[in-house]
Image (cartoon, rainbow, N blue to C red):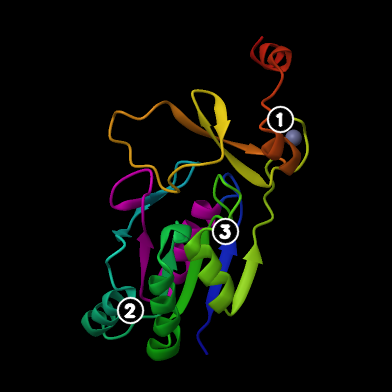
Amino acid sequence: MATLSFYFGTMGAGKSTLALQIHHNLGQTGSGILITQHDREADAVSSALGVSASATVIGPDHDLFAIAKEEAAGRGGLDYLVCDEAQFYSPDQVEQLALVVDELDADVHAFGLLTDFRGRLFSGTARLLEVADQRNELQVQSRCWCGELATHNARLIDGNQVYDGEVVLVDDGTTADVTYELRCRKHWMHGTAAPQVERLRSVG
Ligand SMILES: [Zn+2]
């Protein structure tokens, strides 16, 4: 029986690396597609370690069940989908992934972040947690600057942490300098960056 598996972790937990590995392994004996949204490169999934593979890039209006059904018809069957950046999928698209599992009997492996910079579940992630057959937390752990486990993604604008704003920022060239930083809950809640002296020491 096919399953819908959701793998989640913070930035730096190796989600894209594992997505690429699973796609590679399953592709040896089966037929499947790699799907992503908003990746670092167009038409590809790339990992922080430098591995990449071509991918189908979707937007919010794509019907994932229709895409999978068409692929299945063209290939004479579909064994799996590997979905990266699944936190950005709409709740409807997550339900389409469940249909792929139940109606096309194809395994779906979805990878995503748990919470956004506001500390709230992404809407795609929330739906995945609700409908997945398996939920797996990735065990590669990132650290806050203080050494504690990093569980939260902080959004920094010109170096200052913010808690409000659009979940997905579109870079139109006019936005301020936006970066993300992994922090423990305490320092995420306090909005505390590493002390300046620590930064100088790490640089020097
Ligand atoms: Zn900390």
Q: Nearer the viewer, mark 2 or mark 3?
A: 3
In the image, 154: left or right of 90?
right
Q: Is residue 158 above or below residue 94?
A: above
For mark 1, what is the residue? Answer: 145
Identify the amino acid type marked 2.
Phe
Q: Is residue 74 above or below residue 143?
A: below
Of the image marks 1 and 3, the number of the one nearer the N terminus: 3
Instruction: Give the secondary structure at mark 3.
Output: loop
| Mark 3 residue CB less than 8 A from any atom of ligand 1 | no
Q: Quadrant of residue 62?
A: bottom left
Residue 34 inside the magenta-drawn segment: yes
* Residue at image location 46% in from the left, 71% down from the top: 26
Identify the amino acid type marked 3.
Leu
Of the image marks 2 and 3, the number of the one nearer the N terminus: 2
For marks 1 and 2, give the CA distance.
42 Å
The magenta segment: 15-44
* Foreground residue among 89 and 25: 89
For marks 1 and 3, give the CA distance.
23 Å
- On the image, the x and y values in percent for residue 12 come to 58, 44
For mark 2, what is the residue? Answer: 65
Number of residues whose C-alpha sits closer than 10 Å to that of mark 1, classed few (under 14), some (14–19) or many (20 or more): some
Of the image marks 1 and 2, the number of the one nearer the N terminus: 2
For mark 3, what is the residue? Answer: 121
- On the image, the x and y values in percent for residue 145 come to 71, 30
| Mark 2 residue CB less than 8 A from any atom of ligand 1 | no
Number of residues whose C-alpha sits closer than 10 Å to that of mark 3, classed few (under 14), some (14–19) or many (20 or more): some
| Mark 1 residue CB less than 8 A from any atom of ligand 1 | yes
Q: Is residue 62 above or below residue 77?
A: above
Residue 32 inside the magenta-drawn segment: yes
